[in-house]
Amino acid sequence: MELNSKFSPRAKEDYDLVSLAQQGDQKAFSKLMDRYRESIYFMVLKMVHNRDDAEDLTLEAFGKAFNNLKNYSADYAFSTWLFKIATNNCIDFIRKKRLLTTSLDSSSVANEDGEIPTIAVPDYNPNPEQSVIKEQRAERIRQVIEKLSPKYKQLIELRYFDELSYEEIAEQLDLPLGTVKAQLFRAKEMLYNLLKDTQEKY
């Protein structure tokens, strides 16, 4: 990568960290995450208005950025690239959420002929076949979670099965909040890779 001559000293430092991260340097990953986690979180929170969703989306944004570092172009500052990934991730999340919410307000508005149109609301209850598939998928995820180390397995279970907040997990495990977030990010990344490997075998 050729460095943009207009980069600020901070952007140049980010560039050096990205170069190290591309070679697998975990400390460089951590430094970039520590540097931008808070600002990404508050930007995401303004978009989704939910702290738990904002936490998850922040971790997802870093996950997507780190998994796609090979696509990073030094024409732009790393922070610009990272914020764009986080913004697009939020937009996708909001779009999916809206698709799951059907507004029925228009059902009370008459059309030009004075008729009130009906809205066909799809039945989202799973049929027997879908229920079986869902159960099989849940079982496969459970099996994959068993392959994680005890530390990461516990974090995943507390977050996604017990549905505890990050603060509650930190309190229960007597760990700093930042440590919980960083370890959960790592646990989710490992789980994703294991699931991907499992799917490729079938």
Image (cartoon, rainbow, N blue to C red):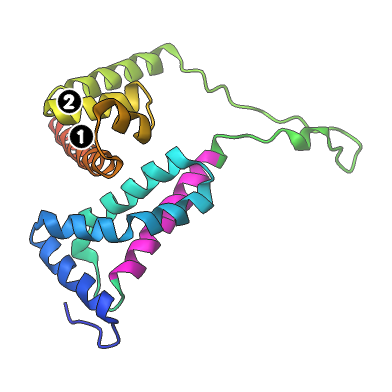
Residue at x 12% of width, y 31% of height: 201
Let me know if residue 52 is in the magenta part. Answer: no
Please state the horizontal and vertical placement of residue 150, each as a whole percent of the image. Answer: 13, 25
Mark 2: amino acid: Val
Mark 1: amino acid: Leu
Residue at x 27% of width, y 24% of height: 157
Q: Is residue 92 above or below residue 198?
A: below
Q: Which residues are magenta?
A: 78-97
Q: Secondary structure at mark 2?
A: helix
In-front residue for pair 142/59: 59
The quarter of the displayed image where residue 164 is located: top left
Q: Looking at this rendering, what residue extends furthest in the right direction?
A: 114
User: Does the residue at mark 1 contact the one at mark 2 (Cβ under 8 Å)?
Assistant: yes
Q: Is residue 17 above or below residue 90?
A: below
Residue at x 39% of width, y 31% of height: 165
Q: Kindly identify which residue carries mark 1.
A: 191
**C-alpha span from label 1 to label 2:** 7 Å
Please state the horizontal and vertical placement of residue 20, each as a whole percent of the image. Answer: 11, 65
**Residue 65 numbered tag:** none
Residue 51 visible within the image: yes
In-front residue for pair 26/68: 26
**Is 200 on the left or on the right of 42, as rendered?**
left
**Magenta span main SS:** helix
Q: Earlier in the sequence, mark 1 or mark 2?
A: 2
